[in-house]
Image (cartoon, coloured by chain):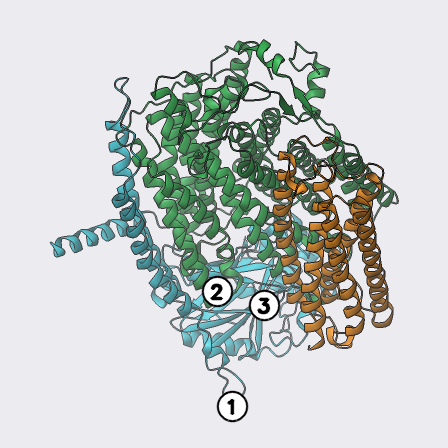
């Protein structure tokens, strides 16, 4: 099988991406899909801010506003932030540990397509009778009372995409445990890989709780069960617990990879090894562990009683300690370093004060007695945007600029990148800082309008103006991407010049088999060590030999498509006679393709040693 | 030395207080203008935690600026690769723990204090409590307030005595809501399956500053008109409260309209409205049958439907088309279209439903 | 060692389920998957415990009225025995004895089918004798969801093992399919363990009220 690709037609490229099992191409798919949903969620955010710019506004109606706020939250968390993080994990993590691919290339593809079809399903609700309108938390009494199919789209769409995420998590765990290059011990793994590892563990143990919660919701709404109906003995608080047992680890699922990206950036652009590497690893693991102990701090006002509230308050405060350790370690990574202010580094530097501001309000929220005032107000809105935008979104922008050359072989324009940064940074603080005060002045969250005469007018206007800065920043980033792609100036292995980890030791983008010979890792920052000894690249850990590669497959796409179809059948079962047949048809497609995958042997193929020798370093394209 | 540190801490607090008072919102709405023991406790915690957090931010900021200014790249040298420092790492592990302990102790104590509702359980010989208890029932987009000791029910406008603890039983009848009077204390959810209990205290002086009216809010997304599910809290001295309660209780039969126009209005009301709205406070119907706010003292209230000004014009607008003002409300479509004459009559009647002579 | 290679009794390694990298990955990944499944069932158990005996009216059947130990005991024995027979199957797999492995897997499948049959009878019995159904109360919803999820896992396990047996019936054992058999048997044990918890939490604790 010849694998050295020539110029291909559009159809061939499309087919290649539909069937690919290469982690680097799947990363690009995640980046495109996640980026698309990010723009969608951003548009929804703009609608929210326009509606709230002045009191008694009627830009959108009350019902539509609730749909927009629900879809903004759901889209940003599940369909934008997580997939974009998955994009970087897929693109970088296997390279960082010196692997040729992930442990389960087929499942990697399946995970992406499940996420994709789940996300598309969820967003089709806009065209099919209205989007979900009970908030991204979808608390049970409201979500059961909600009319139409919006909540069904939410439950089924998240169920499908959640399965994809779970698969991705398992895949990364096994990859990191089993496929590290020779010499890559756990305590030599780059921080981003460690973050991926802990995040994946969180996904594994957090998502099943959401799965169960969504099942109960689907059963109640579509199949007549009574989990959340008090009149039949049900209890809506069960949903709240499941949602937050999942939901709290979820925020660490988002932020830990962001920490990982920043750890890489601080080290690279300070030309200095990460300060306190082992305590950083320890802090990451500890945050992940504590992340499971604190879910009920989202429910202080639910009426759990003072004992539960006090316990969860103290447990939550404890998380501030490992997070603080990280902040100081980053500062001291830069201390004594040689800092250069590239675009990724600007994001990383701006992240520190922004995230600290979000973190300290987190401690205030953790203090149960005062949380009774903050809960469900704009103070909370400000807090979580400070951590999620100031932490996660900053990291995504930073990561995009940092890893763009590694993913696409060309660098984003630095000048435009810096403009994006400045505008976004100003807009971010303008939008969200004032929202702390809006909350304290008595503005509840999730309100579609507010009445004049409550002292909330000016601050809301300020917040809206800030949002426009962010929107312009994102548009400039898009322009940057277009310009960069058109110019397409190729760069070498280590375009930033100060790369420390293995991904910078191979071409940008890497050949589809990543490493011709697996590298020998001699310590933390493996590539940096070699460079400091004056070597050009890594020493190989094995002689040149045949490389075993997995075959492409269309089956993941079909499995996901089957579930997508089945979800429509399940949803319209009650009012249309075609519901049941479509449900069965969809499930048959899914189970049938799983069956085919199961009985058809797939041993993959080998790239022969001779081909590798021929290709040398030049002209190898993925 | 110690005194100096104390002085510094004090000036820090003073500065915080200054900043907070400079932009602290409206006295009838803002959590930063605490008007009662609960809000005050929470405000004190806010100040304490803000002070600690500002200290943390200051330390980070100082290091941050030193780093960013001092360690810019000037030449191509490779800096020394430092692994870490146990001493520093222990410092920034231990100090945050101590800071958190300073916050954790008052947090836990306040959490228990605010949850102490034992006086609600102590019943006297009549089977009533000595403390004032209000049963709050939250509905799609209105509030019912029942005073079990006084045996009266009202809606939309909570009347409470100042300077004493008032105890609340909270429940929702349709979907989950959350009961919040920002200036007076934090919120507690009204769940659909269980009664939540807590207490609030309304400070007399602060109530006077707020013209005796506090704003109440629903703080849990409950549907399209979640934003409009406001209520008012009238906080008055105990003797005025007692007068009000007695006056309410004296309404045994629906109040008879006096003018001709109002009588016509009462007829319209009895034909179209009384199925849902009661006009006697001792409403003996079961909760499920109390479908809309009790209107016994409608004429005394400060707002129509919780959000509109209390004027005849606004009332007519509301009655003409409630959907415009509260999307998704349960009143729309439950009665036939009203002619302008009927509206005039109904308005006259409703505005005359007063228990307090002024 | 390549997965496709033809093996004999002599060349067959001690742990054939983890000889290749793919097999090692599958082995570890499956353990993680079972970790996730554990959280899933833990959540369902929590739901059941929260909603146990929560019925809208007092004349409806509660746990203590419904469950009978003999039936649950027989079901438990069937499933426990099937776990044991799948251990035998794996023993023969490790000894490169394909025929005996197939035989014991066949017995495992039969026992599993017996269990499933009894479960269907049991559900039917509750619905018709006690009007205890999925939609009759929160208790009913929680009970059928927990036990039904387990039952669905059993059914899926049976399909899986049967598919493996038929697919490989003609070609015997190899390092390619040995991990598949091994992982399927791991799954079967997991189902068994979950049932032990169901037997304890639902049936035994249900009896004492």
Secondary structure beneath dot 2 equals helix
Is A342 above or below relative to C60?
above
**Label 2, residues with CA under 10 Å away: few <14, some 14-19, many ≥20:** some
Secondary structure beneath dot 3 equals loop
* Quarter occupied by residue A174: top right
Q: Chain of mark 1?
A: B
Secondary structure beneath dot 1 equals loop
Q: Chain of mark 2?
A: A
* Quarter occupied by residue B211: bottom left
Query: Marks 2 and 1, how far apart in space?
Result: 34 Å
| Residue B336 image offset from top left, x and y in percent | 75, 56
Note whether residue A246 is visible. yes
Which comes before the other along the chain, label 1 or label 3? 1
Which of the two residues, A315 or C41, is positioned nearer the viewer here?
C41
**Label 3, residues with CA under 10 Å away: few <14, some 14-19, many ≥20:** many
Numbered-mark total: 3
Is B75 above or below relative to A201?
above
Note whether residue A463 is visible. no
| Residue B296 image offset from top left, x and y in percent | 59, 70
Which of the two residues, A481 or B198, is positioned nearer the viewer here?
A481
Q: Which chain is green?
A: A
Name the quadrant of the C terminus of chain A.
top right
Q: Which chain is cyan?
A: B
Q: Chain of mark 3?
A: B
Q: Which residue is mark 3?
A: B353
Q: Colour of chain C?
A: orange
Q: Which residue is mark 2?
A: A308
- Left or right of A30 on screen, residue A466: left
Do badges 1 and 3 share one subunit? Answer: yes
* Quarter occupied by residue A311: bottom left
Which of the two residues, A278 or A219, is positioned nearer the viewer here?
A278
For residue B125, which numbered disc appears in the image?
A: 1
């Amino acid at each position: 099988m010849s694998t050295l690709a020539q110029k291909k037609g559009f159809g061939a490229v499309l087919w290649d991406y539909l069937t690919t099992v290469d982690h680097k191409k799947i990363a690009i798919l995640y980046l495109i899909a996640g980026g698309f949903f990010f723009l969608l969620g951003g548009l929804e955010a703009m609608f929210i801010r326009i509606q709230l710019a002045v009191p008694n506004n009627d830009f959108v109606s009350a019902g539509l506003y609730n749909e927009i706020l629900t879809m903004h939250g759901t889209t940003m968390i599940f369909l934008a932030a997580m997939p974009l993080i998955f994009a970087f994990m897929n693109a970088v993590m296997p390279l960082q540990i010196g692997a040729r691919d992930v442990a389960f290339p087929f499942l990697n593809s399946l995970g992406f397509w499940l996420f994709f079809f789940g996300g598309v399903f969820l967003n089709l609700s806009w065209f099919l009778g209205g989007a979900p309108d009970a908030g991204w938390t979808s608390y049970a009494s409201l979500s059961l009372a909600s009319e139409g199919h919006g909540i069904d789209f939410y439950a089924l769409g998240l169920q499908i995409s959640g399965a994809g995420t779970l698969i991705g998590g398992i895949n990364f765990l096994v990859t990191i445990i089993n496929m590290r290059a020779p010499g890559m011990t756990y305590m030599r793994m780059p921080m981003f890989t460690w973050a991926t590892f802990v995040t994946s563990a969180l996904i594994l143990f957090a998502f099943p709780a959401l799965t169960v919660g969504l099942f109960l919701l689907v059963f109640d709404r579509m199949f007549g069960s009574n989990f959340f109906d008090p009149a039949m003995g049900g209890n809506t608080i069960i949903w709240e617990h499941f949602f937050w047992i999942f939901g709290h680890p979820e925020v660490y699922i988002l932020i830990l990879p962001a920490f990982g990206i920043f750890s890489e950036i601080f080290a690279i652009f300070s030309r200095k090894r990460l300060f306190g590497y082992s305590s950083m690893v320890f802090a990451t693991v500890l945050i992940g562990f504590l992340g499971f102990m604190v879910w009920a701090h989202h429910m202080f006002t639910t009426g759990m009683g003072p004992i539960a509230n006090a316990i969860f308050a103290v447990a939550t405060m404890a998380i501030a300690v490992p997070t603080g350790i990280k902040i100081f370690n980053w500062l001291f990574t830069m201390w004594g370093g040689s800092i250069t202010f590239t675009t990724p580094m600007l994001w990383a530097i701006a992240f520190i004060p922004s995230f600290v501001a979000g973190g300290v309000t987190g401690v205030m929220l953790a203090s149960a007695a005062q949380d009774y005032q903050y809960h469900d107000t704009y103070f909370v809105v400000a807090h979580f945007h400070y951590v999620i935008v100031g932490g996660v979104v900053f990291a995504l922008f930073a990561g995009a600029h940092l890893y763009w050359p590694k993913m696409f072989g060309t660098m984003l324009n630095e000048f435009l990148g810096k403009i994006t940064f400045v505008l976004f940074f100003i807009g971010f603080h303008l939008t969200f800082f004032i929202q702390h005060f809006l909350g304290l002045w008595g503005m509840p969250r999730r309100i579609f309008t507010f009445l004049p005469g409550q002292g909330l007018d000016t601050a809301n206007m300020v917040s809206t103006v800030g949002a426009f800065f962010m929107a312009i920043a994102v548009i400039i980033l898009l322009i940057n991407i277009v310009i960069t792609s058109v110019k397409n100036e190729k760069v070498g292995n280590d375009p930033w010049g100060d790369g420390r980890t293995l991904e910078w030791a191979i071409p940008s983008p890497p050949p589809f088999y990543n490493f011709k010979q697996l590298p020998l890792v001699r310590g933390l920052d493996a590539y940096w060590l070699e460079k400091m000894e004056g070597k050009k690249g890594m020493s190989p850990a094995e002689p040149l030999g045949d490389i075993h590669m997995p075959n492409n497959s269309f089956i993941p796409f079909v499995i996901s498509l089957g579930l997508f179809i089945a979800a429509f059948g399940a949803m319209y079962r009650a009012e249309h006679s075609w519901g049941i047949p479509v449900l069965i048809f969809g499930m048959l497609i899914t189970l049938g393709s799983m069956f085919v995958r199961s009985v058809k042997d797939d041993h993959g193929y080998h790239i022969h040693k001779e081909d590798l020798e021929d290709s040398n370093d030049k002209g190898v394209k993925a | 030395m110690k005194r100096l540190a104390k002085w510094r801490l004090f000036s820090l607090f003073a500065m915080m207080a200054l900043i907070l008072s400079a932009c602290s919102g409206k006295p009838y709405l803002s959590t930063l203008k605490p008007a009662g023991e609960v809000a005050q406790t929470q405000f004190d915690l806010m100040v304490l935690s803000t002070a600690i957090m500002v200290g943390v931010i200051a330390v980070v900021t100082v290091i941050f600026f030193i780093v960013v200014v001092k360690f810019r790249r000037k030449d191509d040298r490779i800096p020394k690769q430092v692994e870490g420092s146990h001493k520093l790492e222990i410092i920034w592990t231990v100090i945050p723990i101590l800071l958190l302990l300073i916050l954790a102790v008052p947090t836990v104590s306040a959490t228990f204090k605010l949850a102490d509702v034992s006086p609600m359980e102590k019943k006297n010989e009549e089977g009533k409590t000595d403390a004032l208890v209000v049963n709050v029932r939250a509905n799609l987009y209105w509030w019912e307030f029942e005073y079990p000791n006084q045996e009266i029910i009202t809606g939309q406008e909570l009347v409470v005595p100042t300077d004493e603890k008032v105890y609340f039983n909270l429940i929702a009848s349709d979907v989950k809501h959350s009961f919040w009077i920002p200036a007076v204390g934090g919120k507690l959810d009204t769940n659909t399956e269980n009664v939540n209990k807590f207490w609030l205290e309304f400070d007399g002086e602060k109530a006077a500053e707020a013209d005796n009216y506090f704003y109440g809010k629903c703080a849990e997304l409950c549907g399209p008109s979640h934003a409009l599910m406001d209520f008012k809290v009238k906080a008055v001295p105990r003797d005025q409260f007692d007068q009000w309660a007695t006056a309410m209780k004296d309404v045994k039969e629906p109040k008879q309209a006096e003018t001709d126009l109002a009588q016509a209005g009462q007829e319209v009301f009895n034909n179209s409205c009384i199925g849902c709205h009661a006009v006697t406070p001792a409403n003996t119907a079961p909760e499920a049958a109390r479908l809309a706010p009790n209107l016994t003292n409608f004429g005394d209230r400060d707002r129509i439907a919780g959000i509109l000004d209390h004027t005849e014009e606004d009332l007519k607008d509301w009655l003409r088309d409630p959907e415009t003002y509260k999307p998704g409300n349960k009143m729309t479509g439950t009665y036939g279209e009203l002619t302008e004459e009927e509206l005039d009559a109904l308005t006259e009647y409703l505005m005359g439903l007063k228990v307090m002579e002024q | 060692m390549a997965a496709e290679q033809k093996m004999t009794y002599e060349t067959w390694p001690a742990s054939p389920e983890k000889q290749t990298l793919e097999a090692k990955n599958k082995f570890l990944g499956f353990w993680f998957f079972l970790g996730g499944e554990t959280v899933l069932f833990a959540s369902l158990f929590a739901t059941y415990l929260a909603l146990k005996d929560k019925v809208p009216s007092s004349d409806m059947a509660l746990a203590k009225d419904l469950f009978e130990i003999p039936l649950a005991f027989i079901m438990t024995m069937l499933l426990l025995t099937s776990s044991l027979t799948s251990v035998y199957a794996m023993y023969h797999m490790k000894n490169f004895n394909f025929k005996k492995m197939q035989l014991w897997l066949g017995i495992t499948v039969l026992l599993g089918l017996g269990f499933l049959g009894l479960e269907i009878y049991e559900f039917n019995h509750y619905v018709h004798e006690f009007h205890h159904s999925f939609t009759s109360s929160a208790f009913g919803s929680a009970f059928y969801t927990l036990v039904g999820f387990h039952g669905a896992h059993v059914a899926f396990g049976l399909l899986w093992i049967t598919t493996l047996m038929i697919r490989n019936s003609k070609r015997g054992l190899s390092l390619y399919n040995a991990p598949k058999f091994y992982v399927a048997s791991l799954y079967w044990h997991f189902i068994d363990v979950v049932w032990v918890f169901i037997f304890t939490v639902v049936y035994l604790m249900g009896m004492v009220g």
